[in-house]
Image: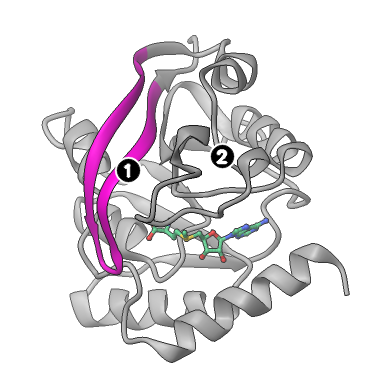
Amino acid sequence: MPVAEMMANFWDERYQAEPFLFSTKPNSFLVEQVTGNPRPGHKAALAVGDGEGRNGVWLAEQGWHVTSLDYAAEGIAKTQRLAQERGVSIDTVCADASTWTYPAERYDLIVLLYFHLPRDAAIRAHQGCLKALKPGGRLILEGFRKQQMPLTSGGPKVEDWMYSAEEITSDFGTLDASVNRAVGRVLREGRLHGSAAVYQFAGTKAD
Ligand SMILES: C[S@@+](CC[C@H](N)C(=O)[O-])C[C@H]1O[C@@H](n2cnc3c(N)ncnc32)[C@H](O)[C@@H]1O
């Protein structure tokens, strides 16, 4: 079975087993970065690896027109249910983010939150995101960095799947970064608890 299919099954099983694995609250870095920016109106956002939809649905509540992409069908179903409960609509795509055909210059905002792939697949997904970002659009990323390996607060537990400053620069160096930092933070995101080694990035594509 291809790795992507195996991993999608892994996530489907996890999402079936729990009401909300990562809670229904949005990621705090996303909230910090998006709140206070000019009203988005109906601008387009893409949430890549959106899981059970806590971030995509929160963006929709802020007025964004959101496409939530994940390869776990169970996650997509939960995203749609959460959106319905919150009285917002959201587009969902069930696809592998490393092979998906990203539309050119479609999105004003792309978010990658705790989205971890083998390095070769990550490069393809990140290139797709750059292509899909409109000029002037922003990309926001938070995820585990390689120093998370010995810690017990979550993560893929494969060093190659986690971020380093060099990889972020190599993949997103063409964006004008407003945040580009390795941080230690205490995670309180559903089942993820405790001190974590995290990378945060926010950057804008040139007009
Ligand atoms: C750790 S969860 C994070 C979910 C969500 N971003 C959040 O912060 O709550 C990672 C998600 O990425 C998805 N994912 C991983 N690899 C993927 C791929 N190649 N294509 C699409 N989704 C993927 C998984 O199905 C899972 O829902």
Question: Circle 1 — which element?
Answer: strand
Q: Which corner quadrant of the image does residue 190 belong to?
A: bottom left
Which residue matches tag 1? Answer: 196
Cα–Cα gap, marks 1 and 2: 12 Å
Helix, strand or loop under label 2: loop
Q: Position of residue 205 (x, y in %)?
A: 49, 16
Q: Residue furthest right?
A: 1
Q: Residue 154: tell me if it is visible.
A: yes
Q: Is residue 197 magenta?
A: yes
User: Which residue occupies the foreground of this view, 136 or 112?
Assistant: 112
Q: Which residue is mark 2?
A: 162
- Left/right placement of residue 14 relative to residue 189 reads right
Along the line of sight, the residue nearer the viewer: 118 or 136: 118
Farthest-out residue, bottom? 17
> Which residue is found at the position 17% from the left and 35% from the top?
32
Q: Position of residue 95 (x, y in %)?
A: 68, 64
Whether 191 is among the magenta residues is yes
Q: Nearer the viewer, residue 137 or 124?
A: 124
